[in-house]
Amino acid sequence: MNTQYEDLTNAISELSIQAGEKENELKQLHTELKKAKKALNKQYDDMKLRIQYMYENSSTGYMEVLFSSDNFGDFLNSAQNMAEITRYDREMLDEYAKVKMQVEEKETQVLEEQQQIALLQAQSSEKQEQIQELYEATYYQIREYSENIDSAQ
């Protein structure tokens, strides 16, 4: 019984340590998730501002800018500038999508960690119940032996 008790106690200690480690991992994930959400919101706000600026200040179309060039050099410069702006906008959109995916992954990880912590806590409770049952069984056996000894005397 002592061996069983020690085994159960060691199992509870190990489960407590694992739960503590998972709690630390969960805290770290929460911190990373907050940072990722903050970056996502900043990128979204920047993109909104960029689109608003383009809408409000774009009285002329791309074709009009290109065809209103004085010479072929101006035409090429305008075309190159528009291509660079479009490339930059595409990169920012891709970066936004990447950060959004990271946020979703972090949220999934947080849920998984919470489930693992709940599982560890359930296992710990089960082990504690086993210890309580072992304690009660031992107590009643000792009491029975004590009564047998008293009646034998």
Image (cartoon, rainbow, N blue to C red):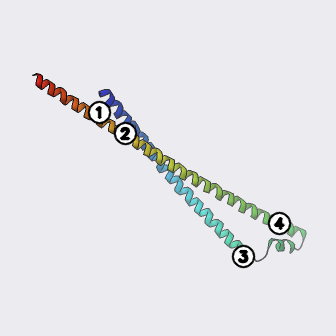
Residue type indicated by callout 3: Asn
Quadrant position of the N terminus in the picture: top left
Give the residue type at disc 1.
Leu
Q: Tell me if 125 is positioned left or right of 146 in this view.
A: right
Counting labels gives 4
Which comes sooner in the sequence, label 3 or label 2? 3
* N-term mark: 3 or 4: 3
The numbered mark at residue 126 is 2
The residue lying at 29 percent from left, 28 percent from top is: 2
Task: Judge whether 69 appears above or below 106 on screen.
Answer: below
Residue sitting at x 61%, y 54%: 101
Q: Where is residue 74? Give x, y as percent.
A: 86, 69
Mark found first going from the N terminus, 4 or 2? 4
Query: Which of the labelled discs sits on residue 134, or is there none?
Result: 1
Q: Residues within 10 Å of mark 2 (few under 14, many from 20)?
A: some
Name which quarter of the figure residue 10 lies in: top left
Query: Which quarter of the figure is the C terminus placed in?
Result: top left
Q: For mark 4, what is the residue? A: 79
Q: Nearer the viewer, residue 72 or 115?
A: 115
Residue 151 locus on image (x, y percent): 11, 25
Q: Amino acid at mark 2?
A: Glu
Q: Are marks 1 and 4 in contact (CB under 8 Å)?
A: no
The residue that label 3 is drawn on is: 57
* Residue sitting at x 70%, y 58%: 91
Q: Nearer the viewer, residue 53 or 75?
A: 53
| In the foreground, 100 or 46 | 100
